[in-house]
Image (tube, coloured by chain):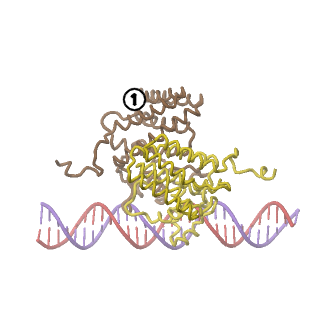
Chain colours: A brown, B yellow, C red, D purple
Amino acid sequence: MNLAETTTDAPHVEIYNRIWLSIAERKLKPGTRLKEEQLAEIFSVSRARVRQALAALEHDGLVTLVPNRGAFVSQPSIEEARDIFFARRTIETQLVARLCEVVTPTAIARLEAHVTQEREARAAGDTKATVRLSGAFHLLIGELAGSPYLWDVLRDLLSRTSLIIVMYQTRSQTDCGPDEHAEIVAAIARGDADRAKHLMNHHIDHLEGQLDLEQDTQEPSDLRDLLA
Amino acid sequence: MNLAETTTDAPHVEIYNRIWLSIAERKLKPGTRLKEEQLAEIFSVSRARVRQALAALEHDGLVTLVPNRGAFVSQPSIEEARDIFFARRTIETQLVARLCEVVTPTAIARLEAHVTQEREARAAGDTKATVRLSGAFHLLIGELAGSPYLWDVLRDLLSRTSLIIVMYQTRSQTDCGPDEHAEIVAAIARGDADRAKHLMNHHIDHLEGQLDLEQDTQEPSDLRDLLA
DNA sequence: GAATAAAAAATTGTAGACAATTTATAACGC
DNA sequence: GCGTTATAAATTGTCTACAATTTTTTATTC
């Protein structure tokens, strides 16, 4: 949530960004231990820098810091996962509505170009790019809606979503369909705020529905359940 | 945005909390310089601890860290201020709507008790308590709506609002009227989500309207303007 | 006397060393 | 052989001293 840009970026933000990206792109899996010395060597920096970056990542919920034990990539619970999707519906429906009010031809062009890119990546079978562009579409809406604060919140929500998808995805594909994105863009182009909100709501529902968030247990499954 | 509670609170969070509170309660004014050594002495801790706390506060936008120059209490621009209020309307209207869906008699009792407290503080002329309780009312709605994530965002927004009020308040009083809070509670009690959203929207509009955010200039007023 | 330049002081940034804690390994008793 | 305890290794947490930068003060010159 770094709204107030510092004139010159602090040195630890590069490490922060690289770890952030690795988690958002689902390379670093939930539960992975992040040893300070190890990271310090990889990035060729002092341990203090790594420490700062990890502290910032904890603030974003991507990393869990256990005192005297170290840093781990977070493992959001089912309850937390549902909450994140609720927050996304809350914020993103409002954001598309706002975008419908302030929309410009340039904005629509950018959105359409983005959807085209998504289609191309999918057609080319480039799953890495497909995943990245899917998230970027949602961020683009946030950007065009013109609220830097909510854009930042959205960025945070998307990275948490990545973590959640890795943890709870089922066999079936878990990308947002580009067709749903295209429909949303069409509604925005028409200035139909209600329709855009409705589509966005269902789109996020769809995303959540593809995951296995059905268990009632709060805690990670008990040993007894696994042996029953 | 500390969702994942650590088992034992890290030692720097107490310093963080005390500075946070001083800003939220409007004791520390925007632009105030925060020297590390000075703070270290006040709290009787090492400078490293202070550093951690300041980094966390920067993340929340309450403190601006200028490289090699030090930490200052943030001075949000008019543009940022407007954005914060937009974000508040976005989130808080959805939050009251959600609360209407999941509301319980206990929740209503807590809300009514809170409004009573607000009235008492105001009647007693206790401005410090009045300010604190005003913010707490909004947080209480967030808590009862049952979204830990959005509660955290709301907490962040409220502390930024405090900063904005200090910077842009006019002579007239800038508290939320407790009557408006009472009306919102009444709407929630009736389960009237639309009405509650509408009231909350206007309540925040009202808050924003009491401030002097009319200037068109982005930058802090130019010397020429002051000498014209 | 004002402006510039140099030196000194104050403040922040960083690194390395040491202490505390946890995890892994090995020895021991049953 | 299994569980327990003691030792050793690895890892994190913290502090102190030093380097880099900025601000203030002082001296100099026009």
- Is B188 or B133 nearer to us in this picture? B188
Q: Position of residue C23 (x, y in %)?
A: 30, 61
Residue shown at the point (37%, 44%) measured from the top left: A82
Q: Position of residue A87 (x, y in %)?
A: 44, 44
Which chain does tag 1 point to? A
- Is B90 or B123 nearer to us in this picture? B123
Evaluate whether residue A180 shows in this view. Answer: yes
As drawn, B139 above or below A110: below
Q: Is residue A25 left or right of residue A111?
A: left
Element carrying mark 1:
loop
Residue shown at the point (47%, 33%) measured from the top left: A197
Evaluate whether residue A22 shows in this view. Answer: no
As drawn, A221 above or below D6: above
Q: Which residue is mark 1?
A: A125
- Is A196 or A164 nearer to us in this picture? A196
- Is A189 or C18 nearer to us in this picture? A189
Residue shown at the point (37%, 48%) measured from the top left: A80
Q: Position of residue A210 (x, y in %)?
A: 34, 36
As drawn, B71 above or below B85: below
Category of crowding for the residue at label 1, using alpha-carbon neighbours closer than 10 angstroms: few (below 14), some (14–19), many (at least 20): few
Q: Position of residue B56 (x, y in %)?
A: 51, 58
Q: Is residue A146 left or right of residue B14?
A: right
Residue shown at the point (35%, 36%) measured from the top left: A209
Q: How many marks?
A: 1
Q: Amino acid at mark 1?
A: Gly
